[in-house]
Image (cartoon, grey):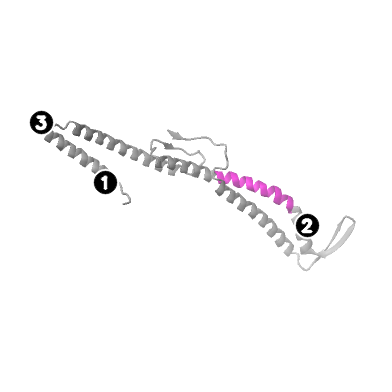
Amino acid sequence: MAINTKRRNYFTKPDVQGHFILVTFVMVCICCVLYAAMFANFSTDSMTITYKDNNLTLGKTPIVLFKEMLKAQGLFILFGGFGAAILAMLISHRFTGPLFKLETFIKSMTEGDHALTLYFRPKDKTHELAALINLYNDKFSKEIYDMRVTTEALSEKLAQFDVSKPDSAKNNVAEAVQLASQLQEKLQQYKIRS
């Protein structure tokens, strides 16, 4: 079974993506204000005359430029900021989508489902991780299969144990001990927390 669902939801991890979008929007706003301040700062020690609504105004050039640039950049902040936020959502989806899929996949593994295969979208940069996890799942599934076969054979040998036939009982016990030691060897391969 493969976890390869197509999602149209671009908010797979809203907390992570929301933070990323907010930071991007705030950075666009800060950059616009800093640009206006730096541009106005280059014209220090000069005066500017502005004519607006039949009013003639005289003012220091940096202040006049800063105010006018912020007015002009207001539209850029509004549209550019929202454009940057949408772009941030699309970019963040590139790493939160695989993260969401990986979390779902590992949750299935912790619930005991190791028959899954993990796939990522062709443009995702996590194919090596998917290959490694799939390799682990394949190896673990094979080990579990081998242990199941061994325990079934062990159960069969113990079921055939007949006290009335000492020779066959002795052989069954020897084979059961051998199967139990094979199972123990398989289990010894795994490092576990104690």
- Callout 1: helix, strand or loop? helix
Q: Residue at 28%, 35% (x, y): give it.
A: 148
Query: What residue is disc 1 on?
Result: 188
Q: In the rendered structure, which amino acid carries the disc numbered 3?
A: Lys
Q: In this view, does 194 lie above or below 151?
A: below
Seen from this angle, which residue lies furthest front? 164
Q: Of the residues under marks 3 and 1, which one precedes in the sequence?
A: 3
Q: Looking at the image, is mark 3 or mark 1 nearer the viewer? A: 3
Q: Residue at 53%, 35% (x, y): give it.
A: 6
Could you tell me residue 91's position as x and y percent? 57, 45
Mark 1 crowd level (few <14, some 14–19, many ≥20, 10 Å Cα): few
Left of 132 or right of it: where is 152? left
Q: Residue at 31%, 38% (x, y): give it.
A: 144
Q: In the rendered structure, which amino acid carries the disc numbered 2?
A: Glu
Q: In the rendered structure, which amino acid carries the disc numbered 1?
A: Gln
Magenta span contains residue 118: no
Q: Give the position of the N terminus as an image quadrant.
A: top left
Q: What stretch is highlighted in magenta?
A: 73-93
- Callout 2: helix, strand or loop? helix
Q: Distance between the residues labelled 1 and 2?
A: 74 Å
Q: Of the residues under marks 1 and 2, which one precedes in the sequence?
A: 2
Query: What residue is disc 3 on?
Result: 165
Q: How many marks?
A: 3
Left of 56 or right of it: where is 144? left
Could you tell me residue 99's position as x and y percent? 49, 45
Left of 1 or right of it: where is 40? right
